[in-house]
Amino acid sequence: MYGDRLTPTAASVAAVLRDDDLLREIFLRLGFPNYLVRAALVSKRWLFQISDPAFLSRFRDRHPPRLLGICVGHPSLYQFVPLPRPPELTVVSRRAAASCNDAFAAGRGQCIKHCRNGRLITGLYHDGRFRYSLLSPLLAEEPVVVLPPTPVSRRDWKDRPQKAFTEIFLPEDGGSDGITLVNLWTVGGKVSAELYVLRSGGWGVPATAATELELPVEQHHATFLKAMLPPVHAKVFLVTTFGFTLVLDLATASFFTLELPVGVGQSYKISCADGSGLYLVNVDGFQLSVWLYQMTGGDNHAGGWLLVDTFCILDACRRVAADSWVPKNGDFFGVLAVGENAEFVFLDHVASGVLFYIHLRSRLAEKVYQRRTSGAGLAYSVLDHIRCSPFMMSWPPIFPALSGGPDQQE
């Protein structure tokens, strides 16, 4: 027996555990946010170190949020499809799959409106309007939250719009406070929008924005807006039939136009780049292109598009699709979703009903979903009806409540 004396090994371990700098370096190598949560449960001192914003920023730079799977399908027919992940994320992925699939089964007829940072907003159309709910599948103890009824649009109902959108988006900071509702409509070349932000006191008074576009005569009674993409850097991008995207700046409640790269049509998605930049990913035939646009300061037109990558996806997709796809000229791919910093893209090959995942850095392709087909062997649904929402691990991690000082041990 050595009494209270420590062996040399134990003394070395104790010295490390008393050194906050060394502790942070050890925590930095854990690699997965769920391991940070486990470590934070050891003591208040460890929780204090791990939950420090400076440490979390370093951890995120080294270990970006992980993609666990996708919520894919059609309203009332969604399912969570896990993607191959490291064994360390198996439990987390199973929890997300079980929680999502239970929610989809319980809410027949609902549609996914937005998915971000481990949370989902679903909408159910009832009595002439949508009812929205917030789901947090990774937090087993957190129930489904029914959002307050959304305000009725204040637009002039005497004007019949050519196109009207109502979309709801989760905040970009990863939290649940600050959900944004966007009502948008067009009458001729005029585009109008109302912006509501959900706070503790409800939806509040809307901000409004409007712009007038010069349209060719033949377009005055046609639909020129095709889709509303989720916000990136507090800007909503509207897909048009022209060679530009119409941008709604949520911070200033104003519109501006952003020219697209030459040759980019209507099948593209935009994601955030580091700083204030944007990535745009599109596919033309079998050629996939990645573009970068840098917005600096307050100038929304500062950068210009830079082609940063382009490659042919034919061989990679054909290799993983096996017998479900015979490529041919004129094949059409739809870009369904793009990850932050253009890390990955999900593509829909409509003719075969195959959804592909492509990791854009390594160019690794995976077949992740096969849509059901009709008796004629054609895709059961068209591109506009399929929905694909990448499901990411939440960031920052949800830690236990911190009380007392960092030197208090549990």
Image (cartoon, helix red, strand yellow):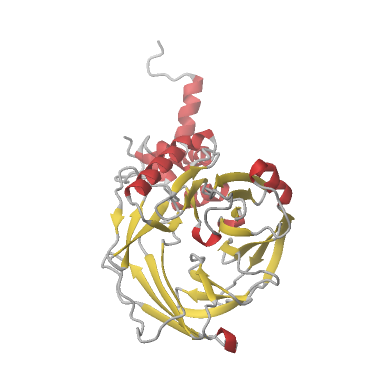
> Residue at 60% of width from left, 59% of height from top?
334
Image quarter of the C terminus: top left
Quadrant containing the N terminus is top left
Q: Quadrant of residue 34?
A: top left
In percent of width and height, residue 347 lies at 60, 54
Q: Nearer the viewer, residue 30 or 90?
A: 90
Q: Residue 376, how many percent across, how many down?
A: 57, 50
Q: Is residue 354 above or below residue 189?
A: above
| Left-right relation of 44 to 34 | left
| Closer to the camera in the image, 277 or 138 | 138
Indicate the position of residue 198 as horizontal and vertical percent values. 33, 66
Residue at 71% in and 64% down: 307
Residue 10 seen in the current view:
yes
Q: Residue at x 47, y 43 (%)?
A: 33
* Image height of 232 relative to 406, above or below: below
Horizontal side of 124 relative to 91 (left or right) equals left
291 up-or-down from 64: above or below = below
The spot of residue 42 in percent (x, y) is: 37, 34
- Residue most toward the top? 1
Residue 290 falls in image quadrant: bottom right
Position of 218 with respect to 138 (left or right) is right
